[in-house]
Structures are given as structure tokens and as C-alpha cells.
Image (cartoon, rainbow, N blue to C red):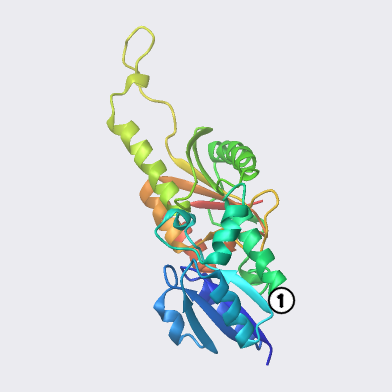
């Protein structure tokens, strides 16, 4: 039986990859990250589960080599802000970090992939086993985006693509063709929540923009509902940091006052499959992929 290494981060993504790999006949050896991976991974049918800290790159390599693993995938988020946490890198990771001119996702994980390759471990696309969960092109929900939401999407895609060249984040939140929030290290859901708080603070503040130049009161005409645009980076490496949305994303959007979600067809995973679409329909959230 062929072996596959799984470097597991947080969330459900590692579990989906593990199930799919087993269904394809792989014996899966899991490298579970102590600071990120759910303990439930222990009872999910892996051939072996090895726990290691984020800083233990040498231990990761040694573990896979002892297990005879020559192919591996990364699945699940590892919070980028962990770079600045109290985690102590081993000598190999410390050397790698010192060699980087930037410490964004692409440069950091790309360098890790190169080290693994040099040690005989090929890092493969994390979506290779999950093709059915990649979002299809078109309007996915009962409700299509409104004219204003379409304008938000067009503007948001331009902003997100420009930011993608710098590997800052995959998500922007737009209202009335204005950028309300940009994802950095906090992640998609936190970005959407922040956008909701910003718009709520606008609603609760003095309505200065409700006054005419003559000082007379006038009703607000701007649509304050939010559009979330989550795209792959211009040169997205499908081995890691793949855009992912799930039912929780829809719940966060609803709570934040977001009514539309735009995704990249073929490059974003619907973590909960059709349940995401059902949740969006119930929340009257339009989802479109291009």
C-alpha cells in the first residue's frame, strides 16, 4: 500500500484529505502540529500520528523518513502570526527563517517545500484528492448578485489581485465599491467580522454624511451591505494556502451584514460541500465563482 504524509494544520481540511487519501488506497502518516491540529485526528484512521511543534522542521523530516514517506501534502491552516509567537524554531527552521528576505506565506512555505524536496519528500497539491470540492464556475446559489454586488465584486477583484502580488491576503470586503477591510494575518473570518464592526460603528456614529452642504438633513443613500471577495493569488501555489470557505464563513458573513461572496472557480475549496450553498440560501447570501 503506498504511503502519503499529511502535514495537518487546524480545521476540517486535514480530515477531508485523510478520508480521501484512505479512499484512494493510501496509508496515511500524519504529522500533527501541536499548536494547531485537533486531537480528533488520533481516531480518524491514520496509519500513524506523530505530534510535533511548529518549530520542529528537523523532526518532521526525520519522522517522514523513518516512516518511508516520500510524498506529502499540507492541509489545514497554520496561523501566520505564529511566526511571531513564543514558538522556538529548531536549527533547521531558524536557518531557513534567517535566509528569507520576506516572511509571507509563499516565501516561508515555499522554502519549507524546498527543504523537504532536498530531503527526498515531494510536497504535492493539497487539492489533488479533493477535486469534487473545488468550486465550479457560475452562480451557485438561488439568488444571483445584485447590480451593486456585481460592481463590488469587480472592484474587489481588482484590489485583491493587486494585493495578491504581495501575498498579503486572499480576502477583501467591499461596500459601495469602497474597500472596508483587507485580510492580513488574522484570516478570512476575522476580516469579515472586522468589516462588520466597522460598518456597525458607522451606523452608530454621528451621521455627518447625512447632511447636505447647506447643513440640512438628508437620508443616507449608500448601501452598507458587504460583499466578500476571496480569490487565489495570481500565482497561487496549490500545494499550500489554498482558499477555503465553509458553513462557518457564511455564518460570519450573515452576522457581519455581508450579502454576497465571490470566489475563484477551480481554485477555492467548499469545505462543507453543498452544505455551504444550503447555508447561503438560508441566509440570502449570493455566491458566485468566476
Residue that numbered label 1 is attached to: 120
Left or right: 154 as drawn, with respect to 205: right
Q: Is residue 104 above or below residue 110?
A: above
Say whether residue 284 is visible: no
**Where residue 283 sits: x, y (%)?**
42, 55
| Residue 47 image-quadrant placement | bottom right
**Where residue 45 sits: x, y (%)?**
51, 88
- Tell me which residue sits at (54%, 56%) in the image: 142
Q: Secondary structure at mark 1?
A: loop
**Where residue 164 sits: x, y (%)?**
62, 45
Nearest the eye: 32 or 66: 66
Farthest residue in the top direction?
214
Say whether residue 245 is visible: yes
**Where residue 3 sits: x, y (%)?**
65, 86
- Tell me which residue sits at (56%, 45%) in the image: 168
- Tell me which residue sits at (60%, 47%) in the image: 102
Q: Is residue 273 above or below residue 171?
A: below
Left or right: 85 as drawn, with respect to 270: left
Amino acid at each position: 500500500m503506498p504511503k502519503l504524509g499529511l502535514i495537518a494544520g487546524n480545521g476540517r481540511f486535514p480530515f477531508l484529505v485523510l478520508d480521501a487519501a484512505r479512499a484512494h488506497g493510501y496509508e496515511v502518516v500524519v504529522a500533527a502540529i501541536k499548536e494547531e491540529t485537533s486531537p480528533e485526528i488520533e481516531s480518524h484512521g491514520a496509519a500513524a500520528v506523530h505530534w510535533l511543534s511548529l518549530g520542529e522542521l528537523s523532526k518532521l523530516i526525520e519522522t517522514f523518513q523513518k516512516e518511508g514517506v516520500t510524498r506529502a501534502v499540507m492541509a489545514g491552516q497554520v496561523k501566520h502570526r505564529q511566526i511571531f509567537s513564543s514558538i522556538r524554531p529548531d536549527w533547521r527552521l531558524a536557518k531557513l527563517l534567517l535566509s528569507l528576505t520576506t516572511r509571507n506565506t509563499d516565501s516561508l512555505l515555499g522554502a519549507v517545500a524546498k527543504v523537504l524536496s532536498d530531503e527526498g519528500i515531494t510536497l504535492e497539491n493539497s487539492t489533488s484528492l479533493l477535486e469534487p470540492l473545488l468550486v465550479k464556475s457560475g452562480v451557485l446559489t438561488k439568488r444571483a448578485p445584485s447590480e451593486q454586488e456585481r460592481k463590488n465584486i469587480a472592484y474587489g477583484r481588482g484590489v485583491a489581485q493587486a494585493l495578491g502580488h504581495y501575498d498579503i491576503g486572499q480576502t477583501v470586503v467591499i461596500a459601495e465599491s469602497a474597500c472596508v477591510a483587507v485580510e492580513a494575518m488574522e484570516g478570512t473570518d476575522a476580516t469579515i467580522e472586522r468589516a462588520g464592526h466597522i460598518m456597525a460603528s458607522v451606523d452608530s456614529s454621528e451621521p455627518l454624511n447625512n447632511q447636505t452642504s447647506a447643513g440640512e438633513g438628508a437620508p443616507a443613500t449608500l448601501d452598507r451591505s458587504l460583499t466578500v471577495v476571496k480569490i487565489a493569488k495570481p500565482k497561487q501555489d496549490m500545494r499550500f494556502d489554498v482558499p477555503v470557505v465553509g458553513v462557518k464563513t457564511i455564518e460570519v458573513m450573515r452576522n457581519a451584514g455581508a450579502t454576497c461572496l465571490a470566489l475563484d472557480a477551480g481554485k477555492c475549496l467548499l469545505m462543507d460541500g453543498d452544505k455551504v450553498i444550503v447555508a447561503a440560501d438560508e441566509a440570502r447570501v449570493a455566491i458566485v465563482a468566476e
